[in-house]
Image (cartoon, helix red, strand yellow):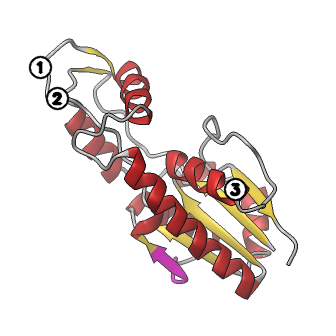
Amino acid sequence: MQITLVRHGRPNYSGAERCTPREMKTWIEGYNRAPVVCSEVPQSLIDQAKRTEVFACSSISRCVESRTRIAGGCTDEVDEVFAEAHLPYPDWNGPKLPVKVWRILFRGAWFLGFARHTESIRVSRKRARKAADRLIELARIHGSVMLIGHGIMNVLISAELRKRGWSGPLNLILKDYWQPCAYRKAR
């Protein structure tokens, strides 16, 4: 059986380069609405998708759009259980720093328990367990499943798969857009 986790395509979004923590709300909303740069999808991923029996994707538009680009309409399993664990942000009016700095700081704080304006890591891990359950069920039925998901949620799902005896990459945190990571387990 095989479960392949793929991070969605790169959103076509630049947004503000610098902002306050409070302004991150606007940046996050813009990122979530941005279309995907579809011209970047690797041919090898399209070829791999042709050999996949069933697809799952997050209900967030960038994943549905990525799935459509890879292999046509996302009609198999569209579910919010696969949605990203969004960035938290505090309601501070300063300082104004590069968005990249805030993203790193807020994600690190989220892993340590800070969850203002989003679900906690505890809730996200619980959701990742449900997502892993669903993917394993699909793999048992169909043999192979490909999830078009998100960076952080894919990290949490992969940890759940490894806990359950699936073999695959240990660290997805630095995986780029469109990058597949396969997890396998004998029936």
Residue type beneath disc 2: Arg
Q: Which mark is residue 93?
A: 1
In the rendered image, the vertical position of residue 91 relative to residue 115, given as above or below? above
- The N terminus lies in quadrant: bottom right
Q: Quadrant of residue 147?
A: bottom right
Chief secondary structure of the magenta portion: loop
Residue 148 shown in magenta: no
**Residue 22's disc number:** 2
Q: Is residue 55 visible?
A: yes
Toward which corner of the image does residue 135 lie, by quadrant?
A: bottom right
Residues marked 1 and 2 touching at CB (< 8 Å): yes
Residue drawn at the location 48% of the way across and 63% of the way down: 82
Is label 2 or label 3 in front?
3
Query: Which residue in the structure is indicated by mark 3?
Result: 163
Q: Regarding mark 3 in the picture, which secondary structure is present there?
A: helix
Q: Is residue 100 above or below residue 113?
A: above
| Marked residue nearer the N-terminal end (1 or 3) | 1
Identify the amino acid type marked 3: Lys
Magenta stretch: residue 75 in it? yes
* Mark 1 or 2, nearer chain start: 2
